[in-house]
Image (tube, rainbow, N blue to C red):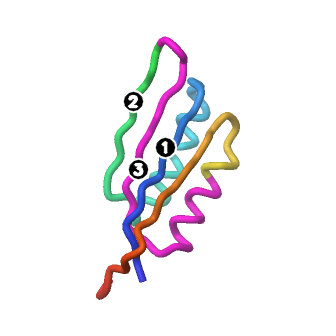
Amino acid sequence: MKRIGVIGIALRRDRDTALAIQNLLSAFSDIVIGRMGVPDKESGISAISVIVKGTNEQISALCGKLGKLNEVYVKSAVTSFEIEGE
């Protein structure tokens, strides 16, 4: 069963890391519904929120791969209700 979730990502400004995140989100585009990124130029930190719809395994796989990147911090929240018929 699929669920809706939110993945919060914080990263220090680093072009290579940002590109790695972009590549991962593209690889998991089948579960990404939308995303928004906000850079904080003063602190050099960016925040990205990603709305996903997928199985627990798919969402966990994406979070796990994001969490392995250098200077990337990830938190996720997944709804408890299940989406039927998908």
Percent of width and height locating residue 4: 37, 66
Badge 3 amino acid: Val
70 shown above or below 14 = below
Q: Which residue is disc 1 drawn over?
A: 22
Residue reaching furthest to the front: 80
Would you say residue 44 sits in the magenta stretch? yes
Disc 3/disc 2 C-alpha distance (Å): 12 Å
Helix, strand or loop at mark 1: helix
Label located before the other in sequence (3 or 2):
2
Quadrant in which residue 52 is drawn? bottom left
Q: Quadrant of the N terminus?
A: bottom left
Disc 1/disc 3 C-alpha distance (Å): 11 Å
Badge 2 amino acid: Val
Judge the density around disc 3: few (<14), some (14-19), many (≥20) Cα neighbours within 10 Å: some
Quick check: marks 1 and 2 in contact, CB under 8 Å? no
Which residue: 35% across, 40% down?
Answer: 36
Quick check: marks 1 and 3 in contact, CB under 8 Å? no
Percent of width and height locating residue 82: 37, 80
Badge 1 amino acid: Gln
Q: Nearer the viewer, mark 1 or mark 2?
A: 2
Q: Which residue is disc 3 drawn over?
A: 50
Quick check: marks 3 and 2 in contact, CB under 8 Å? no
Helix, strand or loop at mark 2: strand
Q: Which residues are magenta?
A: 42-65
Helix, strand or loop at mark 3: strand
With 52 as the anchor, is 85 left or right in this view?
left
Would you say residue 50 sits in the magenta stretch? yes
Q: Nearer the viewer, residue 83 or 70?
A: 83
Q: Nearer the viewer, residue 43 or 19?
A: 43
Q: Nearer the viewer, mark 1 or mark 3?
A: 3
Residue reaching furthest to the top: 42
